[in-house]
Amino acid sequence: MAFGQLDRDNSPQPLHEINVTPLVDVLLVLLVVFIIAAPLFSHKIKIALPKADAPKVAQPQKPLIVSLDVNNQIFLDQEMMTPERLQSRLTPLANANPQLAVELRAAGELRYQHVIRVIATIQKAGVTKLAFVTEPATKK
């Protein structure tokens, strides 16, 4: 019998650490595969579309520009007008195109009543799409 002897087995002890090197290797390989494969998934699908004899969709028209300067003068694009002449010019255009758009550019110093008169003239001509053009405020 072997009293007082300790167990001196020289067998290898289990490791208490995880070896992450193979895990990192696998993740890097997957990353490379996805980097290479990603552009292949984003290409467009090629389809032979059917042919049809439909008319082309009309491009939106450029809006007419009505301007009011500080002297209360009315301009249609670059041509000076009276309110009556403005209405007579806009009426046939509005009748021909119900989607006619007009941009109103009025000087900031004008009185409200002058701007309202021009708006009323444009509405009497039959224009239903009216946009007010401003400049962005500057930060101080």
Image: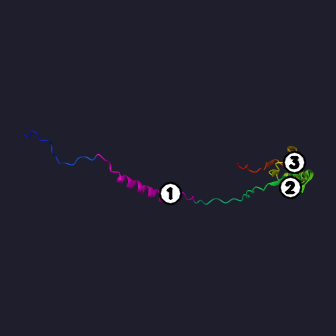
Real-space Cα separation, disc 1 to disc 3, in angstroms: 58 Å
Which of the pair 63/70 is nearer the observer? 70
* Magenta run includes residue 27: yes
At label 3, the amino acid type is Val
The stretch of residues the image draws in magenta is 16-45
Nearest to N terminus: mark 3 or mark 2:
2
Closer to viewer: mark 2 or mark 1: 2
CA–CA distance in space, label 2 to label 1: 54 Å
Which residue bears the numbered disc 1? 38
The amino acid beneath tag 2 is Leu
* Dot 3 and dot 2 residues touching (CB under 8 Å): no
Of circles 1 and 3, which is in front? Answer: 3
The percent position of residue 72, horizontal first and vertical second, equals: 88, 50
The disc, 2 or 1, on the residue closer to the chain's N-terminal end is: 1
Q: Position of residue 112 (x, y in %)?
A: 85, 44
The residue that appears at 48% across and 58% down in the rendered structure is 35
Residue 118 shown left or right of residue 57 in the figure = right
Of 120 and 40, which appears nearest the observer? 120
Q: Is residue 48 left or right of residue 80?
A: left
Label the magenta part by its dominant secondary structure.
helix
* Residue 67 location (% of width, % of height): 84, 53
Q: Amino acid at mark 1?
A: Ala
Q: Residue visible at 90% across and 55% down?
A: 81
Q: Can residue 32 be found in the magenta stretch?
A: yes
Compared across the picture, whether 112 is left or right of 2 comes to right
Per the model, the C-alpha gap separating discs 3 and 2 is 11 Å
Q: Give the structural element (helix, strand or loop) at label 3.
A: helix
Question: Tag 2's secondary structure?
Answer: strand
